[in-house]
Amino acid sequence: MTDAAPTAATTDASEPMRWGRILLKLSGEAFAGDKGFGIDGGVVSSIADDVIAAHASGVEVAVVVGGGNIWRGMTGAEGGLDRAQADYMGMLATVMNALALQDILEQKGHPTRLQSAIRMPQVAEEYIRRKAIRHLEKGRIVIFAAGTGSPFFTTDTTAALRAVEIEAEVLLKGTHGGVDGIYTADPRQDASATKIDSLSYLDVLNEGYRVMDSTAITHCMENQLPIVVFDLMGEGNLAGLLRGESIGTLVE
């Protein structure tokens, strides 16, 4: 297909957006929907609509996808597989999710580029930082797959790395399952848990909030990259965040 969509710089946005370039982290589990495993096309289509709306507002959008709906390296290691081998299998799972998202985005008329940290030229470009930035500047939605290309690192860490590398202004961590931010405890298990509107990187690390792994949080802290944890599946949440609404939990 041709890259006919307008660039972020020329899109007619009705109001100024909070950030000009974002990195959106999508969990693999979200792709499964209520099925709990595999890829639910309807869910991916809904996610794609939110991404398209963000892009249409004039924001440059990059996406990192997880693979937990298909395979988790840690689970494989616990089952007796070599941890590095299991992690490589997890990287391949992220590519499957990324291909699904790319396909639906392009069916809806939006040019994308899929970049993989593992070379597989038949299905994706090799990750090259400057090329990724150029794609964003040309108005393409860029999807990063295969994690960092190295075992022992989560896709949360990938999101933090890629966000800093492409000079994103924020890392948006989309959750699922009805949890709309960081809570004092798991609200699905503790009715007394209260939502936290904002906190520091050190608060997240010291209190052990299990929202992103410590490597990702530390990398964001060292590079002063804000993180917003929000409910990805909540209708209008991504658009509201971009308009500056107080949604989710801000970590900075």
Image (tube, rainbow, N blue to C red):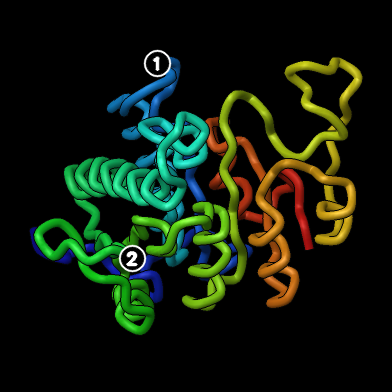
Foreground pick, 52 / 88: 88
Discs 1/2, front: 2
Percent from the top left, x then y, of residue 66? 44, 45
Residue marked by disc 2: 117
Which mark, by number, is residue 35?
A: 1
Residue at image position (70%, 49%) is: 245
Q: Residue at x 46, y 47 (%)?
A: 83
Query: Element under label 2?
Result: loop
Q: Label 2 sits on what residue type? A: Ala
Quarter of the image with the C terminus is: bottom right
Q: Image height check: is 100 above or below 199?
A: above
Q: Secondary structure at mark 1?
A: helix
- State the separation of the CA atoms marked 1 and 2: 28 Å
**Is 138 situated above or below 91?**
below
Residue in the picture at 85% in, 59% down: 200
In the displayed structure image, the side of residue 54 where residue 237 appears, left or right: right
Can residue 13 be seen by looking at this rendering? yes
User: Residue at 35% of width from left, 56% of height from top?
Assistant: 146
Farthest-out residue, bottom: 130
Q: Bin the neighbour count of mark 1 within 10 Å (Cα to Cα): few under 14, some 14-19, many 20 and up.
A: few
The three-letter code of the residue at mark 1 reads Lys
Q: Within the image, what quadrant is residue 120 found in?
A: bottom left
Q: Please state the horizontal and vertical placement of residue 33, each as a whole percent of the image.
A: 43, 22
